[in-house]
Image (cartoon, grey):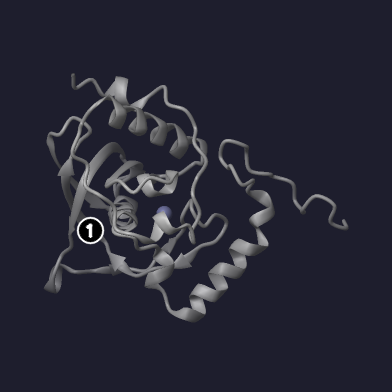
């Protein structure tokens, strides 16, 4: 069966794993079985990504050391692109084709903070879809950044590992300051949207 409606809708929202949890900092295992168990994971990852308003989500972010990510992300033409990549490998431009973009980046596993991360503005990602069919995703705009960010997750790298230590400290402070907004099981429990933390002086 290759009906993506069946594998990409109807999942349940899972808590998002945070930076510092060991699974987020280890290389994942390749997907070998493209079975119902994988399809249920993919459904749940789509539901979790949508609940958290994300553009991409790696399996490590729901606590599993398996090499698969999902995305639902605009490209440079603002076309929404949606899909699944198992065992991804990213190819980046070299030489004069390599143009770096330093936009702000965030991560659902370190919520509330953003930092400038320099990455090539184009990325090609090869892998397999949830049925084991080869896929090639050509990423421009935010999708180029997303493909690199999610593949990094599956290699045990978070974007905080790619920025200078001073920027990392600033990022960690931002996340700590906004931590009250994000319950431990977020996005199962929603983000708090009050202007100030509960109990804070007005
Ligand atoms: Zn992330």
For the point 27% across and 47% down, the residue is: 67
For the point 18% across and 62% down, the residue is: 92
Residue 133 location, x and y as percent?
A: 12, 34
In this rendering, position of residue 103 left or right of residue 68: right
In this rendering, position of residue 20 left or right of residue 75: right
Q: Residues within 10 Å of mark 1 (few under 14, many from 20)?
A: many
Residue 71 location, x and y as percent?
A: 33, 42
Q: Secondary structure at mark 1?
A: strand
Circle 1 residue: 122
Among the 4 quarters of the image, the one containing residue 120: bottom left
- Where, quadrant-wise, is the C terminus in this rendering? bottom right
Among the 4 quarters of the image, the one containing residue 3: top left
Ligand 1, image quadrant it occupies? bottom left
What is the tally of numbered marks visible in this picture?
Answer: 1
Q: Is residue 58 visible?
A: no
Relative to residue 49, is residue 104 depicted above or below?
below
Residue 87 location, x and y as percent?
A: 20, 47
- Where, quadrant-wise, is the N terminus in this rendering? top left
For the point 40% across and 56% down, the residue is: 24
Relative to residue 52, is residue 40 depicted above or below?
above
């Amino acid at each position: 069966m290759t009906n993506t409606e069946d594998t990409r809708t109807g999942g349940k929202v899972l808590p998002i794993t945070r930076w510092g949890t060991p699974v987020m900092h280890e290389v994942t295992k390749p997907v070998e079985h493209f079975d119902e168990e994988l399809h249920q994971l993919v459904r749940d990852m789509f539901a979790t990504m949508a609940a958290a308003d994300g553009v991409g989500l790696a399996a490590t972010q729901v606590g599993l050391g398996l090499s698969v990510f999902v995305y639902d992300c605009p490209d440079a033409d603002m076309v929404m692109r949606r899909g699944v990549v198992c065992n991804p490998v990213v190819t980046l431009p070299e030489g004069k084709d390599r143009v770096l973009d330093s936009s702000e980046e965030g991560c659902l596993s370190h919520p509330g903070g953003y930092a400038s991360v320099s990455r090539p503005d184009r990325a090609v990602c090869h892998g397999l879809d949830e049925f084991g069919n080869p896929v090639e995703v050509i990423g421009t705009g935010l999708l180029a950044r997303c493909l690199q960010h999610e593949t990094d997750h599956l290699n045990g790298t978070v974007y905080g590992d790619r920025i200078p230590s001073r920027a990392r400290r600033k990022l960690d402070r931002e996340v700590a300051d906004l931590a009250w907004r994000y319950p431990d099981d977020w996005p199962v429990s929603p983000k708090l949207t009050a202007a100030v933390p509960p109990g804070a002086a007005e």
